Image (cartoon, helix red, strand yellow):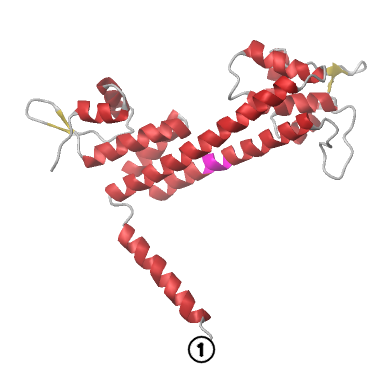
């Protein structure tokens, strides 16, 4: 059996050998055997784990990556793949929100409600439902000075206008790509002044970031599949046989002679 030195794997992945030890301590990679002198004996399986882990870090969160790789170690491939699928679905939804935000910035007259008229004053519950954002998040953004809803003079309840709705959608789109609060404030407040060029620019950048994450996620899934093959959870020969069997069976069923 071929064994890999930590430095060999570290050089391939452009990381330090201490990083390999960290990943091992997190339980994301199975513990290797040790030589009589105490050196780690990494195998092809460990290399596949490390490759997958580094790719998943780029497309997914560290927490999700560790959870998925622990499931692979337990042999629960299906649960691991469904967790990945759920995260990809979230990214797809994030893309839809970003595209909606960009459309609203490009055309402020675009209706926010399909086949309906948007109210001039809305409650926090209505604003949350329209933007698919938790009321607690909206309150937090208000506390941070990103949005300033009006208040009902009689009961003090928050009142949101169509401009606030656009701001909430913009914050939701930018929160993962604009890291500094002051930068976020400047962009979001520009919507109030109908000064939208910078908001459009950063929204396009956010969309570009989402596209990049999508590509990285697919590459990570490819290496996750390679890992499953390496540890014996997927047999590519069986998959290929089934694929061709299904093809020929369908062709035979569709034949004019039948």
Q: Determine whether 90 is above or below 7 in the image.
A: below
Residue sitting farthest toward the bottom? 257
Q: Is residue 215 left or right of residue 93?
A: left
In percent of width and height, residue 164 lies at 80, 24
**Residue at 11% in and 25% down:** 38
**Residue at 69% in and 31% down:** 133
In percent of width and height, residue 22 lies at 31, 23
Residue sitting farthest toward the right? 154
Q: Is residue 233 left or right of residue 117?
A: left
Read off the residue under disc 1.
257
**Residue 236 visible in the snapshot:** yes
Residue nearest the viewer, comparing 148 with 207: 207
Residue nearest the viewer, comparing 16 with 12: 12
Residue nearest the viewer, comparing 66 with 242: 242
Magenta region, main secondary structure? helix
For label 1, the SS is: loop
In percent of width and height, residue 111 lies at 84, 37
Q: Is residue 87 magenta?
A: yes
Q: Is residue 29 left or right of residue 134?
A: left
**Residue at 67% in and 24% down:** 201
Numbered range of the magenta stretch: 86-90
State which quadrant residue 197 falls in.
Answer: top right
Q: Determine whether 186 is above or below 54 in the image.
A: above
Q: Determine whether 34 is above or below 150 in the image.
A: below
Q: Is residue 211 magenta?
A: no
């Amino acid at each position: 059996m071929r064994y890999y030195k930590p430095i060999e794997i570290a050089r391939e992945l452009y990381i330090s050998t201490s990083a390999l030890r960290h990943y091992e301590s997190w339980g994301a990679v199975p513990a290797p055997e040790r030589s009589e002198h105490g050196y780690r004996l990494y195998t092809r399986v460990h290399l596949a784990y490390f490759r997958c882990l580094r790719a998943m870090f780029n497309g997914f969160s560290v927490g999700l990556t560790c959870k998925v790789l622990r499931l692979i170690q337990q042999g629960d491939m299906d649960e691991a793949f469904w967790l990945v699928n759920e995260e990809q679905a979230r990214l797809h939804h994030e893309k839809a929100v970003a595209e909606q935000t960009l459309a609203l910035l490009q055309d402020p007259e675009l209706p926010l409600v399909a086949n309906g008229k948007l109210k001039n004053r809305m409650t926090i519950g209505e604003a949350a439902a329209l933007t698919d954002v938790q009321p607690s998040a909206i309150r937090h953004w208000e506390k941070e000075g990103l949005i300033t809803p009006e208040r009902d003079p009689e009961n003090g309840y928050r009142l949101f206008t169509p401009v606030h709705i656009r701001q909430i959608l913009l914050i939701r789109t930018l929160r993962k790509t604009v890291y500094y609060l002051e930068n976020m404030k400047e962009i979001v407040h520009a919507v109030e002044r109908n000064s939208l060029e910078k908001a459009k620019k950063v929204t396009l950048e956010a969309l570009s970031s989402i596209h990049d994450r999508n590509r990285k996620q697919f590459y990570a899934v490819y290496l996750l599949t390679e890992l499953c093959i390496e540890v014996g959870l997927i047999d590519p020969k069986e998959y290929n046989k089934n694929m061709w069997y299904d093809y020929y069976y369908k062709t035979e069923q569709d034949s004019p002679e039948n």
